[in-house]
Image (cartoon, helix red, strand yellow):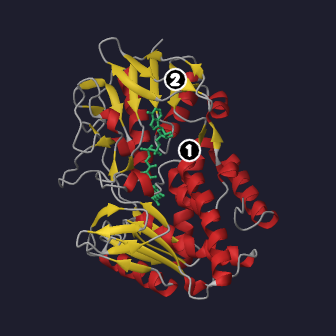
Amino acid sequence: MKKIVIVGGGAGGLELATKLGNKLGKRGLAHVELVDANTTHLWKPLLHEVATGSLDSGIDELSYRAQAYNHHFTFHLGRMAGLDRERKELILAPISDEEKAEVLPERRLSYDLLVMAVGSMTNDFGTPGAQDYCSFLDSRLQADKFHQRLLNTYLKANNTASKKGNFKLNIGIVGAGATGVELAAELHNTASELAAYGLDQLKKDQLNVTIIEAGDRILSALPPRISSAAFHELSKLGVDVKTNTFIAEVTEQGFVTKEGGLIEAELMVWAAGVKAPNWMKELDGLETNRVNQLTVQSSLQTTHDESIFAIGDCSFMLQKDGTPVPPRAQAAHQQATCVYNNILNFLADKPLKPYVYKDQGSLVSLSRYSTVGSLMGNLTSGSMMVEGRIARLVYVSLYRMHQIALHGYFKTGLMTLSGRINKIIRPRLKLH
Ligand SMILES: Cc1cc2nc3c(=O)[nH]c(=O)nc-3n(C[C@H](O)[C@H](O)[C@H](O)COP(=O)(O)OP(=O)(O)OC[C@H]3O[C@@H](n4cnc5c(N)ncnc54)[C@H](O)[C@@H]3O)c2cc1C
C-alpha cells in the first residue's frame, strides 16, 4: 500500500491530511500520515488575536491526534530536520522534555509521496538585535508568550501611570502588512478592555502604538484605496504610522532607523517579510529560491523530484503574469485541494492538473473598529472594495471555510454556536 506523508499540519497540510484520510485512509487504499512539530493546530491568521488576548487559543485549537483518529490518518509528533531522497525517508529531530531529557530519539519515516507544507516564518533580514528584542508571531507559542509580555508590560505601565501623569507606553511594530496593521488595532481594543477590567490608570492617549514601514504606504500588497481606508481607521485610533522608514538595528531602547533616529518602544514586534525555514535551503538537492521556498511546477510537484509536492507558504510558484503565488491562507487552502486531486490522479496513473491561483480578495480586520478589504467578483471586472459588516462577515467566513474543510458543516455549525455562547459566559479578553 502506498504511503503518503504530509509534513506540516497548518492551513494547507491539515486540510489535505483530512481529505486524503477520509478518501484513502478510511478504505485502506493508502497510508496517510501527518507530521507536525506541535501537538495542536490553530489557524495562523488568528495569531494576532491570541497575542492580544482577544482569542483564547485553548478554546480554538485542535488536537492532531483526535483529528487523525476521526479522519483515518496517522499523526507523528516531530520536527522535520532533513531529507534522504534516495531512500525516500524524512528525518525527524529528537524530542526532549522541558528538563532537556530525551522523550524520543531521532527517527526516520519512509514515504512514497511526500507533501511539504511547513509554512513560513517572519524574515528579519538579519537586522541586528531583532531576534534579541522583538517578539514574532509565527506560532501559537510565540503568540502566547507575547500575550504574557503584554499583560506584564500593562501591569507595570498602569502602576507607573498612576504615579506619573505624563507617562507613555510605547509599542512598536515593524511591518505594515496585514499582521502589523491588524495587531495595532487589536492592541487598542486590548487597552480599552483592560481598562474596563480594572487596569484603568493608563489612559487611552498614554498608549502610543507605532507602525514602521519601509515602503511608502501600509498594506502595499492591497489596492491603494484599501490602504487609505485602513490608514484612516488607524489614524482615528491614534496609531502613529511611519512609512518610508527603514530599521537598521533594534536595541533595548527601541528601533534605530537607517538615518540614526531612535523610535522608543518598551514592547517591540517584528512582523515584516516572510521566508521558509532555513533548514529547507539545502534540502537534499531540491530547488529553492532566495527565501528558502521550494520551487514547484504547475502541478505543485517540486521541480527536481516528482514524488515530492509542496504547498502553502513554503512553496514558490510563478503565475502567468510573472508574479509569485502570495503566501496566504486562501492559496494554501486552494493548493491543498489541488494536491488532493493530483495525488488521486497520480495513484490512478492519470495526468496531473495545473494549479491556478484564484484571488478571492483580501480582508483586513481592524479589531471591533472596522474591517476593510477587496473582493474579487465575476460580476465586477477587477476588485470591489468592502467595508464594515459585510467585510467582517466575509473575513470570518474564511475561517469558517477552514473549519468546514476540517470538521464538515454540522460540527462547524456547533462550533460557531459554542463560540457565541463562550462570548456570553467568558470575559471579553483572556486576562491570564
Ligand atoms: C498574524 C497573521 C495573520 C494572517 N492573516 C491572514 C489573513 O487574514 N488572510 C490570509 O489569507 N492569510 C493570512 N496570514 C497568512 C496565513 O496564515 C498563511 O499564509 C497560511 O497559514 C499558510 O499556510 P501553510 O499551510 O503554508 O502553513 P501554516 O499554516 O503556517 O502551517 C505550517 C505548519 O507546519 C508546522 N511545521 C513547521 N515547521 C515544521 C517542521 N520542521 N516539522 C514539522 N512541522 C513543521 C507548523 O507547526 C504548522 O502547523 C496571516 C499570517 C499571520 C502570521
Identify the image quadrant of residue 229: bottom left
In the rendering, at what x and y percent does residue 350 appear? 32, 24
In the rendering, at what x and y percent does residue 146 appear? 56, 57
Q: Residue at x 40, y 80 (%)?
A: 231
Q: Label 1, secondary structure: give it.
A: helix
> In this orientation, does residue 163 appear?
yes
Most foreground residue, 211 or 1: 211
Give the CA separation, mark 2 to mark 1: 17 Å
Q: Which residue is mark 1?
A: 405
Packing grade of label 1 (10 A; few <14, some 14-19, many >=20) is: some
Most foreground residue, 135 or 168: 168
Q: Name which residue type carries label 2.
A: Val
In the picture, the quarter occupied by the C terminus is: bottom right
Residue 325, relative to residue 252: is it above or below?
above
Residue 172, relative to residue 421: is it above or below?
below
Q: Which residue is mark 2?
A: 32
Q: Residue at x 27, y 23 (%)?
A: 284
> In this orientation, does residue 54 appear?
no
In the rendering, at what x and y percent does residue 104 appear? 57, 19
Q: Are marks 2 and 1 in contact (CB under 8 Å)?
A: no
Q: Residue at x 67, y 33 (%)?
A: 66
Most foreground residue, 316 or 167: 167
